[in-house]
Image (cartoon, grey):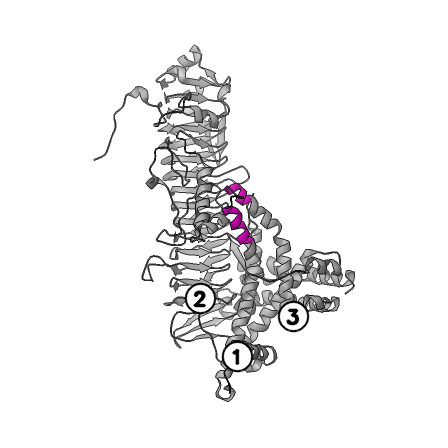
Amino acid sequence: MNKIQKKPLSSLGYNFIETPLPKGKDEYYLRNEQWSRKDQYRKLTAYEVEALVRNDNTSDDWNTIFVSEEFNPQLVQHCHFYGMVRIGKLEPYFLEFHNLRLPVGLYNSTICACDFGDNVVVHNVNYLSHYIIGNEVILANINEMATTDYAKFGNGIVKEAEQESGRIWLELCNENGGRRVMPFDGMLPGDAYLWTRNRDDEQLQQQFKSFTEKQFDKKRGYYGMVGDRCVIKNCKMIKDVTIGSDAYLKGANKLKNLTINSSAEASSQIGEGCEMVNGIVGYGCRVFYGVKAVRFVMASHSQLKYGARLINSYLGNNATISCCEVLNSLIFPAHEQHHNNSFLCAALIMGQSNMAAGATIGSNHNSRGADGEIIAARGFWPGLCVSLKHNSSFACFTLISKGTYTSELDISIPFSLVVNDEHENRLKIMPGYWFMYNMYAIARNSWKYVDRDKRTEKIQHIEYDYLAPDSVEEMFNGLAIMELATGEAWYRLEENAPKKTLTEKDIRKKGKELLLNHPEEVARLTILVKGMENSSREVQLLKVHKAYPLYRELIALYGIKNILAADKASFAALKEAVKSAKRGAWHNVGGQLMKAETLEQLKTRIKKNKISNWNQLHDAYIEIGEAYADDKLQHAFASLLEIKEVNIKDFTGEQLASWLTDSVGTMQFLTEQIRRTREKDYKNPFRQMTYGNMKEMNAVIGSLEDNSFINQTATELEAYKQKVQKTIREWEL
């Protein structure tokens, strides 16, 4: 039975806070703290009351209506007021936004205990309760817009006298809730990552809960706020929602328990048919056309469009999800998912990712239990109609070819193409695929996300370069795997069978020797690898003889590019700066790369309460980001020496000069590959056949010669050559 309460009409608009008030406080004390202009209002004059009554306005008590000096009662018509209402300046103007033109004033609305700034437009708001409205706000055709005294605005907290069961949690990365976190306004991808990991560290987990509890007080009675210059029109229900300035909400069905961040520099928009409940919307976000979002966080400048469903998930900055369904996932910045028939569930996706149509990444749908997980490093690109089984893990920039993968995968070699060859019943992995066959795509991927990073507050330093500490560490791991697999393949041949038991070190040594000196012999081997698929079938590595030298060249290039970027004054200054350089593990913390030791130090500071709240943790991200360039240089230099097999004590200027010159050749190769892999699309007769001639093709897709990205890479190559020549000359190498 519906519980409908009957109360005196005289109490409507009053007694907002249902719990006992602090001693000496009235029900408006929090409202007055939120609204700094409270002293700029006065009571109505007798003339103004008469004018309001004549304009068909009513109030339970005209003495509780307060107005500014520039109040014009003629601009308030057919309204019903309950409780204390404060109205700012009303002048005979109209406000216009996107061709919507409405006169300033309050018309045809029921208003309970609200504050209004100057020159607001309130038209046909059936019920507006307990809101603070900023200056020049437009509210038009809204069914219900109200705030409760226990409003939490999407934050994972409980208010006074509330049960713990009422707390909102985000069940990220796992459907069973084992990695759940408490959402909060301002939550960064790194926060979500640190909280969802380290579940065995109870002290760390308790600190994160404490941070969130301290971020917000538990008092009841905060009003919803609408910032200056917001436009809200044709919406059905807005409940317990606080909205920043310059937001645009139009035609939403239901918005409940939300914080919508917005500002003049990064305005947020929510469009037609959207339903959003229990969440945080970051600055500059776009949500349009029938989106459903429940228990979510959208980081700044992310987008949901065309019926997308985002549930129990965190969506990172500068990411876009259209049409499809995403559940229980933590997604780092720069993710794209545009197709209605793609599905992502129970996953940690570390950014620069793209989900193709038909890709199905679901845990309990193809596993025995609802507790499976997928971890995908940067550049995760599952292709058309890919179905993966949880648990699986993927290295940086893994491309997965169309197919159903019925076993768990652990793809630990970066930049690989993964193929399920059903004809041969074999999993095939091609290391270095991107550099050999689609350099244009991977280079443009790194470039476009830097270009599209619209964050106005860059607290976390996000790495977009495909050659970075995380991917280079994986490349070293890939080299070791290729060496071992090649050595095993060679010794597997009958004529090469060893006469004694060999250690793994012996086998790797042989594999490395073959890969460096006899690539044509390696090309004839069938190279198999273990531990990448949880099945009894064979897993084959393809084109290892080409990938292996490429990885070595690119690691060297990574080292040289970071040496040049460091812009040291001399060779001696460089040697001094990197005298203690070493390689080590790195982690992707919400898109921000950190050394393993830095991450451990960060967690220790949190547990020792040297970092005692989220703001201090965010300051720590900034500090780590400021040190990133130097940390990256140390790693890059150590990687260069290791791949060149040179001890730092023996490192000479002549060696560096030689490596600098060699790096120009690598850059030349990459630049040519960028053009060549795009050029294939223009020379392919099957791509040409839908056009009458090349002129029409160029008119439709743009000519190769006018491709701005290709032209930019050619320009950058020339600049790189000049930088190398200048360094060699000035450092007297």
Q: Secondary structure at mark 2?
A: strand
Assess whether residue 612 is covered by the magenta stretch.
Answer: yes
Left or right side of 187 for 658 = right
Neighbourhood count class around disc 3 (C-alpha, 10 Å): few under 14, some 14–19, many 20 upward: some
Task: Classify 10 Å Cα crowding around label 2: few (below 14), some (14-19), many (20 and above).
Answer: some
Q: CA distance from mark 2 to mark 3?
A: 29 Å
**Residue 410: which disc?**
2
Quarter assignment of residue 21: top left
Q: Position of residue 34 (x, y in %)?
A: 47, 28
Marker disc for residue 389: none
Horizontal side, residue 519 vs residue 132: left or right: right
Q: Nearer the viewer, residue 290 or 480?
A: 480
Placement of 219 over or under 173, stated as above or below = above
Counting residues from the N terminus, which is met first, the one under dot 2 or under dot 1?
2
Relative side of 661 to 96, left or right: right
Q: Amino acid at mark 3?
A: Lys
Residue contact at pointers 2 and 3, CB within 8 angstroms: no
Q: Is residue 118 magenta?
A: no
Residue for badge 3? 644
- The numbered disc on residue 487 is 1
Instruction: Please name the residue shown 39% across and 30% down the image.
Output: 220
Q: Is residue 75 above or below residue 362?
A: above
Give the Cα separation between the discs numbered 1 and 3.
Answer: 21 Å
Location of residue 35 in the rendering, given as x and y in whole percent from the top left corner:
48, 26
Residue range in magenta is: 598-618
Most distant residue in the top direction: 46
What amino acid is at disc 1?
Answer: Gly
